[in-house]
Image (cartoon, rainbow, N blue to C red):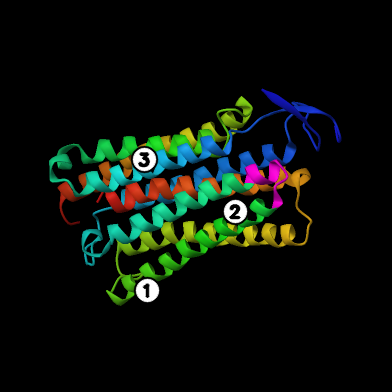
């Protein structure tokens, strides 16, 4: 298929890139701010995970162009990403559970 | 909204290099997923110090995070400039991206040196082992990205990079942004959630 003409999505403009960059900076400032505010101590982990996920999504959608690109690229990225998150959750449950049980059983 | 493009394409009408690169990025998700999992599983299991709250420098790492985010912005600006044939700005943004990558690496070297001086090495405890392997692997990826960016910049200086090679710049960008999103996760999971 060399030299074949294909339809390729047009990427965002520099203006969109700058606006996304500004949002990313604001989200990072919020992340660090939340870390230092004692009032957020109880909800720190979920708030940080949401802010981090928002930054991750913005970069992937706009800077890596998955928003406009072929859905097949989203599939190629999304499936291993979900697999990695699944493995992470499974390992946390399995190994933390095993370590906790071993700790409860005492030495030996 | 689309425009015509020529090059090597699969039967799906997608650029084969881009498809291969997304597959590679998928495999990298699994690599970093396993490293982050290992860090999380052994978190809080160190029997000797130094422990994360004693040693991690959040203000310093926040600046590194900002630096890497800005490098991603420079990268997309470089791509936009190359795509519209503005090679003057293409060269400036490519070099700026590489420079910010170098600043990030310099920060990581400083951080690692400080940790070693404070008694944390890869063999000190579980935190040291999983921390250095995770952030070191990420740093190695940043180093590869910087070399790749500088190679593109030199090719641009030689006049061998133009709108016809925009896909090369886009694929470099994909790699660089992936390195950035991995850091977004590491910054939250390792540094902020202690």
The nearer-to-camera label among 3 and 2 is 2
Stretch in magenta: B79-87
Q: Quadrant of residue A68?
A: top right
Q: Determine whether, in the image, residue B69 is placed left or right of residue B130.
A: right
Q: Determine whether, in the image, residue B183 is placed left or right of residue A65.
A: left
Residue occupying the point 28% across, 50% down: B192
Q: Which residue is mark 3?
A: A52
Q: Position of residue A53 (x, y in %)?
A: 38, 36
Label 2 SS: helix
Spatial distance from mark 3 to mark 2, Cα to Cα?
A: 26 Å
Pointer 2 or 1: first along the chain:
2
Residue nearer the viewer, A88 or B188 = B188
Label 3 SS: helix
Q: Are marks 2 and 1 on the same chain?
A: yes
Q: Quadrant of residue A91?
A: top left
Q: Chain of mark 2?
A: B
User: How many numbered badges does the structure rendering display?
Assistant: 3
The nearer-to-camera label among 2 and 1 is 2
Q: Residues within 10 Å of mark 3 (few under 14, many from 20)?
A: many
Q: Which residue is mark 2?
A: B93
Residue occupying the point 62% across, 33% down: A11
Q: Is residue A87 visible?
A: no
Q: Is residue A6 magenta?
A: no
Q: Which mark is residue B113?
A: 1
Q: Chain of mark 3?
A: A
For this orientation, the residue located farthest to the bottom is: B117
């Amino acid at each position: 298929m060399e030299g074949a003409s294909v339809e390729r999505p047009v990427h965002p403009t520099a203006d969109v890139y700058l606006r996304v960059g500004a949002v990313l900076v604001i989200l990072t400032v919020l992340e660090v701010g939340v870390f230092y505010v004692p009032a957020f101590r109880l909800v720190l982990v979920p708030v940080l995970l949401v802010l981090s996920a928002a930054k991750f999504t913005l970069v992937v959608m706009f800077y890596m162009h998955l928003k406009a690109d072929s859905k097949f690229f989203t599939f190629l990225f999304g499936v291993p990403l979900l697999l990695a998150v699944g493995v992470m959750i499974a390992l946390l449950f399995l190994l933390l559970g095993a370590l906790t049980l071993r700790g409860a059983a005492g030495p030996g | 909204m689309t425009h015509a493009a020529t090059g090597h394409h699969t039967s799906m009408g997608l650029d084969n290099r881009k498809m291969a690169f997304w597959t590679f990025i998928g495999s990298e998700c699994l690599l970093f997923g396993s490293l982050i999992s290992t860090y999380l599983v052994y978190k809080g299991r160190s029997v000797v110090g130094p422990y994360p709250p004693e040693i991690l420098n959040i203000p310093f790492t926040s600046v590194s995070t900002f630096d890497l985010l800005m490098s991603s912005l420079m990268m997309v600006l470089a791509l936009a400039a190359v795509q519209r044939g503005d090679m003057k700005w293409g060269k400036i943004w490519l070099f700026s991206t590489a420079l910010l990558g170098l600043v990030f690496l310099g920060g990581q070297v400083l951080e690692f040196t400080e940790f070693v001086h404070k008694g944390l090495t890869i063999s000190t405890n579980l935190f040291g082992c999983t921390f250095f392997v995770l952030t070191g692997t990420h740093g190695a990826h940043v180093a590869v990205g910087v070399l790749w960016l500088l190679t593109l910049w030199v090719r641009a200086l030689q006049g061998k990079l133009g709108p016809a090679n925009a896909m090369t710049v886009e694929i470099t960008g994909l790699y660089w942004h992936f390195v950035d999103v991995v850091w977004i996760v590491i910054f939250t999971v390792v540094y902020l959630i202690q």
